[in-house]
Image (tube, helix red, strand yellow):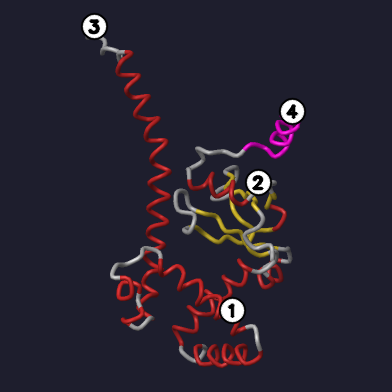
Amino acid sequence: MPPMPPTATPRKRSLRRYLVAGVLVWLPILATIWVVSTMLRIMDYTLVWLPPAYRPQALLGFSIPGAGFVLALVVLLLTGLLVTNLIGRRLVVWGEEVLNRIPVVRTVYGGVKSFAESVFSQSNSFRKVVMVEYPREGAWSIGFLTAEDVPEVSQKTGENHVAVYVSAALNATAGWVIVVPRRMVRELDMSVDAALRMIITCGVVVPPHPAQVKAEAGKSAA
């Protein structure tokens, strides 16, 4: 018989355990720093809107990371203030009429605007976590209910159909939109944040049942 491979020594197992523990501490920190720094660098591009003489590097002699965030916030506030009055709304309507006459721009602008209005409005889009049998019967996928009804599909099939967005693992911004009968969708009590964590971690982080969380909270209070 061939000799059995030697088992890992206690020292090697301890070294591996310490290495994994270190990775679990630093990986989320570095990922967070990378995401935040990337967003700040993107926002710093808004500084090109300022005249060269009024940019922080010209006034102070050095650049300030994240200065573009302040400018972007001011621009957003001023834009919101402008479009909430009568004159601003008319300007927006006029600008949208111009954009809607450009074939490619019309499609992109209309789609992004509809998506933004759905996400930031008080509708139920992306606020309900559901599970649906996809991509085959017996295999359940976690998704987000994006439309309570798809009128044309419901009329053609004679049954209420809803739209569900199923995210891809690791990257929640990539996924599929599926239209299924309402009876095939099961609503969950899971929060959107918990569902996203589960999807991004490929199911490694599974949120507990809300009833279990309440029970543990009651025990802690007692």
Query: In this orientation, which residue lies closer to the viewer: 61 or 205?
Result: 61
**SS under mark 4:** helix
Q: Is residue 47 above or below residue 169?
A: below
Between tags 1 and 2, which lies in front? 1
Question: Which residue in the rendered view is the most extreme toward the front?
Answer: 60
Estimate how packed mark 1 is, as few (under 14), some (14 to 19) or many (20 or more) residues with alpha carbons within 10 Å.
few
Which quarter of the figure has residue 181? bottom right
Q: Residue at x 74, y 28 (%)?
A: 219
Q: Magenta: predominant secondary structure element?
A: helix
Which quarter of the figure has residue 178? bottom right
Residues drawn in magenta: 208-222
Whether 164 is among the magenta residues is no
Q: Residue at x 41, y 35 (%)?
A: 24
Q: Residue at x 49, y 88 (%)?
A: 99
Between tags 4 and 3, which lies in front? 4
Q: Earlier in the sequence, mark 4 or mark 3?
A: 3
User: Mark 1 near mark 2, Cβ–Cβ under 8 Å?
Assistant: no
Q: Earlier in the sequence, mark 3 or mark 1?
A: 3
Estimate how packed mark 4 is, as few (under 14), some (14 to 19) or many (20 or more) residues with alpha carbons within 10 Å.
few
Residue occupied by mark 4: 219
Q: Is residue 204 above or below residue 158?
A: above
Between tags 2 and 4, which lies in front? 4
**Amino acid at dot 3:** Met
Residue occupied by mark 1: 80
Q: CA distance from mark 1 to mark 2?
A: 33 Å
Residue occupied by mark 2: 190
Between tags 3 and 1, which lies in front? 1
**Amino acid at dot 1:** Gly
